[in-house]
Image: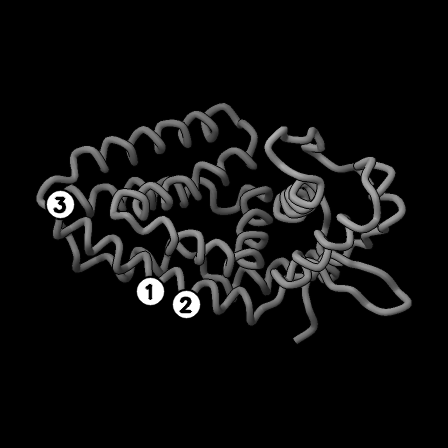
Amino acid sequence: MRLQGVSKNSKENTRQYIYRVLRENIMNLNLKPGESIGEIELSKILNVSRTPLREAIVQLVEEKLLQVFPQRGSFVSKIDYNLVEEAIFVRETCEERILKMAMCDKNVNDLVMKLEKNIEYQKIILNFDGDLHEFFTLDNEFHYILFDHYNKKNSWKAIKRLSTHYDRLRLLDALEKTNIEATLNQHIKIVELIKNKDDKNVDTLIEKHLLNYKDVIKKYETKYPEYFCSK
């Protein structure tokens, strides 16, 4: 098992450190869906005791990112179709609302500037065949900018807590380079809608932007069947 980002932050305690490292490695697919997580091996890699490790595992189980089976051990949760569907339902509802707020706002210059700056960074990643994990981070940041601008940070945090299975599916799609250019173009279109106060096309664009997840799941279930829960 090879973990990324194992340097400890001076502001985090041991449990927080273990939780962060495991969560980041699960979310960036370095730890694959269905992969076994050995406590003894983890303790050695992270140089931590078993108590805070188990506390971090309990937290990740509560977030549905790990599963613990008696006599078998801990495993990274497989991508669950129902959790993906629920996350999309929440995101679609909230993002339509936040965009309509932007279109009713008479002064969106600062918001537009931040979104366009983010888009330029996305273009750099795409044009220079950069780190697609970084593109995925910029994608999330694009949407965070909208929620932050209208003082809805906690709403975005709630969305992200619900979106762990959906985000892993999105990242899998990004790493396959399937929808990267389409995602960028949709971000550009979102900014155009805000500038033009075009609220008539918001619903259609958001639905398209949040992936045709049924087709995406079907595609990757065929390619990576071990990554998905049985229906």
- Depicted 121 relative to depicted 22: above or below: above
Residues marked 2 and 1 touching at CB (< 8 Å): yes
Residue most toward the bottom? 231
Residues marked 2 and 3 touching at CB (< 8 Å): no
- Spatial CA span between label 2 and label 3: 26 Å
Q: Quadrant of residue 8?
A: top right
What residue is disc 3 on?
Answer: 196
Q: Which of the labelled discs sits on residue 89, or is there none?
A: 2
What residue is disc 1 on?
Answer: 93
Q: Secondary structure at mark 1?
A: helix
Residue 155 percent location from the top left of the image: 37, 56
At 55% across and 67% down in the image, what residue appears?
A: 83
- Depicted 146 relative to depicted 230: above or below: above
Residue 32 percent location from the top left of the image: 72, 50
Q: Nearer the viewer, residue 42 or 111?
A: 42
- Amino acid under disc 1: Thr
The N terminus: image quadrant: top right
Residue 3 percent location from the top left of the image: 75, 37
Q: Secondary structure at mark 2?
A: helix
Foreground mark, 2 or 3, reads 2
**First reached walking from the N terminus: tag 3 or tag 1:** 1
